């Protein structure tokens, strides 16, 4: 087997939300696989700290503060990447917000709009800006971070996050649309849909009782760890997945088999 298929050496990647959680884990993995990397995050300090940690490991690593809900900010991120690296081969749309939503009848439009602006529109804006460059270079890999909440109603304590779920369902359909539109340019667009993961966002304010409920719904009997996801992200970013596009890979420990 040609293990070079999984190498990211010489590739340039952008990971949004790359300063913590799954984004941080992917940033570390991509650099270890040889990719030059732009860590893009609204948390400027956090992105700089991860950048400092990864610098000196071989690949070129930079950080950039970005608000993915702002087309202007996204444009500045892409311009920065192109000025510094000269190209963008891989985009991971990982940045998102979630949690704390009331029942649909109590959900305020302001919160709905905020979640849609980041989780769905932000994914579109980044894909559009980077995709425009990838079309010109006639190749690229885009990986969108969806969620099993975009496929099933994921409940906890009898509640679920309606806006987040709808936004992530939109990400899954956006993945298919972009994959179909951009396949002729040799651009692969796929998504990853994780279940509960042991990250700051995933476990924020979760009580011990809630954690028991979360694990109960996962046949494999545990919450996901960041290292459970990074292999799939590296696969979708590498040449090993060159004939795969428009798909959503579920990393859910069997959650959706019920």
Image (spheres, rainbow, N blue to C red):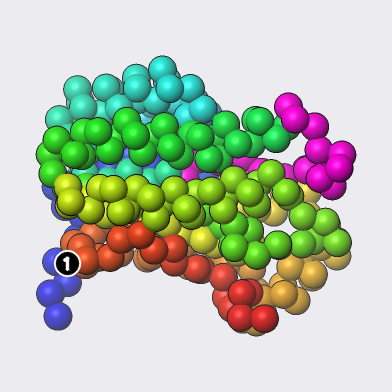
Q: How many marks?
A: 1
The front one of 255 and 197 is 255
Q: Which residues are magenta?
A: 94-110
Q: Residue at x 63, y 58 (%)?
A: 149
* Residue 109, magenta (yes or no): yes
Q: Is residue 189 left or right of residue 186?
A: right
Secondary structure beneath label 1: helix
**Residue 223, image quadrant:** bottom right
The front one of 36 and 95 is 95
Residue corresponding to mark 1: 5
The front one of 41 and 208 is 41
In the rendered view, tell whether residue 198 sits above or below residue 24: below
- Note whether residue 229 is visible: yes
- Residue 98 % position (x, y): 66, 43
In the rendered view, tell whether residue 246 sits above or below residue 16: below
In the rendered view, tell whether residue 68 sits above or below residue 182: above
Q: Residue at x 69, y 44 (%)?
A: 163
- Residue 57 % position (x, y): 25, 45
Q: Is residue 100 left or right of residue 14?
A: right
Which secondary structure type mostly characterizes the magenta part of the structure? loop
């Amino acid at each position: 087997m040609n293990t070079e298929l999984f190498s990211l050496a010489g590739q340039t990647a952008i990971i949004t939300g790359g300063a913590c959680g799954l984004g941080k884990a992917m940033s570390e993995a991509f650099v270890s696989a040889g990719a030059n990397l732009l860590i893009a995050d609204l948390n400027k300090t956090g992105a700089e700290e991860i950048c400092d940690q990864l610098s000196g490991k071989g690949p070129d690593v930079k950080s950039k503060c970005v608000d993915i809900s702002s087309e202007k900010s996204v444009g500045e991120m892409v311009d920065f990447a192109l000025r510094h690296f000269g190209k963008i081969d891989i985009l991971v749309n990982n940045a998102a917000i979630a949690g704390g939503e009331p029942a649909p009848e109590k959900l305020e439009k302001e919160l709905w709009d905020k979640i849609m602006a980041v989780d769905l529109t932000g994914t579109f804006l980044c894909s559009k800006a980077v995709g425009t460059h990838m079309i010109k270079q006639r190749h690229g890999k885009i990986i969108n971070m969806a969620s099993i909440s975009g496929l099933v109603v994921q409940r906890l304590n009898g509640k679920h996050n309606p806006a987040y779920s709808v936004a992530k369902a939109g990400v899954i359909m956006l993945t298919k649309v972009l994959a179909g539109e951009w396949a002729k340019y040799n651009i692969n667009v796929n998504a990853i849909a994780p279940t509960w993961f042991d990250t700051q966002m995933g476990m924020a304010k979760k009580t011990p009782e809630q954690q028991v409920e979360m694990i109960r719904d996962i046949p494999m009997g545990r919450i996901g760890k960041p290292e459970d996801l990074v292999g799939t992200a590296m696969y979708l970013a590498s040449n090993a997945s060159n004939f795969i596009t428009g798909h959503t890979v579920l990393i859910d420990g069997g959650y959706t088999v019920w």
